[in-house]
Image (cartoon, grey):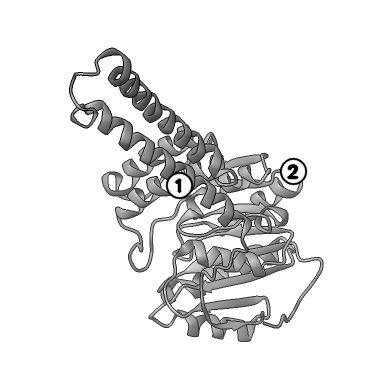
Amino acid sequence: MTSIHETNTMEISVVIPLLNEEDSLKELYDWIVSVMQSNSFSYELLFIDDGSTDKSWDVIIALSETNPCVKGIRFLKNFGKSQALHAGFEKAQGNVIITMDADLQDNPEEIPDLYKMIVNDGYDLVSGWKKKRYDSYFSKNLPSKLFNWVARRTSGVKLNDFNCGLKAYSNDVIKHIDVYGEMHRYIPLLAKNAGFSNIGEKVVKHQARKYGTTKFGMSRFTNGFLDLITISFISRFGKRPMHLFGSLGVLMFIIGFGFSFYLGVDKLFINPTGRLITERPQFYIALATMVIGSQLFIAGFLGELILRSKRQQQRYFIKDHLNL
């Protein structure tokens, strides 16, 4: 890819992942540009079209033709919000990166305050908190509250709204984290694990959806909990799998060996005329625990080998791009 309209003094990059949002893009663009111009920010708008099947990409092309600050990336198919953010983070050039959704539910008027919290107050990351929401209580608000409570208790990151798409980052943060799978909900935790501990939160305005329908169903909460377990495991043992699997393997093997030793001593010296060892339940406990222990140990060893091999992953495929 080649870069056009590059600058070393760009203040803000706005990264906007989207899927089938042709009706809202022009209005969102006008709103963001108005905020940028009224605050005299130097900026770029990065629209990440995550495999839209409507005319979203045509709208992005039209906007880029009238404003060189508009840039775009188009995926061959829908890869998910995390991959879209990852692509946007790779190309973002601003000192502060703002992420927001394209459905007009995030308010661009929040951008100046978010920018100041990063630049003036020294935060590494500021997450929006939609304290007052305009979504259905039982289908979105209540599950979201339960999800956020579990995420706070499990991750140790004290945020009220992990799901809010409106966030601000320093450039250092987005260049040092790797967003994949469906980990976009846990970018604050990824940042914390990368050493960026100065994480703040700001109450932001939530707008009622104006066009279209939500792209997320109830499955996002189930996936979110599974992702939380994954990232908690990775943050603790991702760089040292042998510490978990090896320890469990050794423990299981010792238990199995202990049962085997007991059976051998009992058969040889205590009760040589008793039942055969293979007729006793302790024999199968010993056999199973020793086999499982060996397998866990091998799993940890293989994990260490994999970590030391060169990782080659291609998470998304770009169909087209603009001004990049």
The image shows residue 262 at horizontal and vertical percentages of: 34, 20
Residue 159 relative to residue 209: left or right: right
Q: Is mark 2 on a helix, strand or loop?
A: loop
Find residue 122 and name its label. 2
The residue singled out by tag 1 in the image is 230
Find residue 154 and name its label. none
Instruction: State which quadrant residue 40 falls in.
Output: bottom right
Q: Name which residue lies at 36% across and 63% down.
A: 215
Q: Which of marks 2 and 1 is in front?
A: 1
The image shows residue 254 at horizontal and vertical percentages of: 43, 28
Instruction: State which quadrant residue 220 falls in.
Output: bottom left
Q: Name which residue lies at 45% across and 71% down.
A: 24
Q: Residue furthest top?
A: 270
Residue 279 relative to residue 53: left or right: left
The image shows residue 74 at horizontal and vertical percentages of: 52, 79
The image shows residue 194 at horizontal and vertical percentages of: 65, 46
Above or below 35: residue 60: below
Q: Name which residue lies at 45% across and 34% down.
A: 248
Which quadrant is home to the C terminus? bottom right
The mark total stands at 2
Q: Is mark 1 on a helix, strand or loop?
A: helix
